[in-house]
């Protein structure tokens, strides 16, 4: 989506989003299937009755539907050039995205180090 914001809408951008959403949906579905047994309360807290991995699966499916719709739109009939936005707000959104991704990476490394994550992490494995 950042490519669309920065450079304008393009079919290749939507194809990249679609491929990423497929991987995310498969990962979320795996987590859902791990906790589908009767009596299993699931992992982590729930939001509106659904766990975060279930919400992740739903959001990935919504993104796939959105990308399929956007790929069906004929942009050739649009006579204006397809330019992306370039300004302070766009730069701030992109910077915020990368800052959140970096913070998530740091917290994941602190919980799991560089190996597989524990089944039920209750503390950081890597402490400063």
Image (cartoon, rainbow, N blue to C red):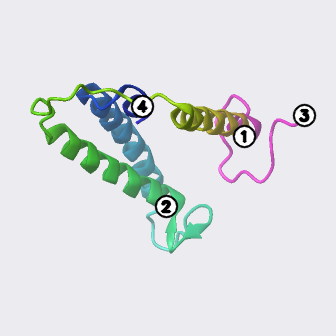
To which residue does mark 3 refer?
128
| Front of the two marks 2 and 1 | 1
- Per the rendered image, the range of residues in magenta is 108-128
Quickly name the residue at label 2: 35
Q: Which residue is mark 1?
A: 107
**Circle 4/circle 2 CB separation < 8 Å:** no
Tell me which numbered mark, 1 or 4, is placed earlier along the sequence: 4
Q: Residues within 10 Å of mark 4 (few under 14, many from 20)?
A: some
The N terminus is located in which quarter? top left
Q: CA distance from mark 3 to mark 1?
A: 12 Å
The mark that comes first in sequence, 3 or 1, is 1
Q: Where the C terminus falls, by quadrant? A: top right
Query: How far, Cα to Cα, is label 4 from label 2?
Result: 43 Å
Q: Name the residue located 59 percent from the left edge and 61 percent from the top edge.
A: 43
Q: Residue at the spot x=68%, y=54% of the render? A: 120
Helix, strand or loop at label 2? It is loop
Q: Is residue 109 magenta?
A: yes
* Residues marked 1 and 4 touching at CB (< 8 Å): no
Tell whether 125 sits left or right of 36: right
The residue wearing badge 4 is: 85
Query: Which badge, 3 or 4, is on the more N-terminal residue?
Result: 4
State which tag comes first along the sequence, 4 or 2: 2
107 or 73, which is in the foreground?
73
Q: Secondary structure at mark 4?
A: loop
Q: With 39 as the anchor, is 62 left or right in this view?
A: left
């Amino acid at each position: 989506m950042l490519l669309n914001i920065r450079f304008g809408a393009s079919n290749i951008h939507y194809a990249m989003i679609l491929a990423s959403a497929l991987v995310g949906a498969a990962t979320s579905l795996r987590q859902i299937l791990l906790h589908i047994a009767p009596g299993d309360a699931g992992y982590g807290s729930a939001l509106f009755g659904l766990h975060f991995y279930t919400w992740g699966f739903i959001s990935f499916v919504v993104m796939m539907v959105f990308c399929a719709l956007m790929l069906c739109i004929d942009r050739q009939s649009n006579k204006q050039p397809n330019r992306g936005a370039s300004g302070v707000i766009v730069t701030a959104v992109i910077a915020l995205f990368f800052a959140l991704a970096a913070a998530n990476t740091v917290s994941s490394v602190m919980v799991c180090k560089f190996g597989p994550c524990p089944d039920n992490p209750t503390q950081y494995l890597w402490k400063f």
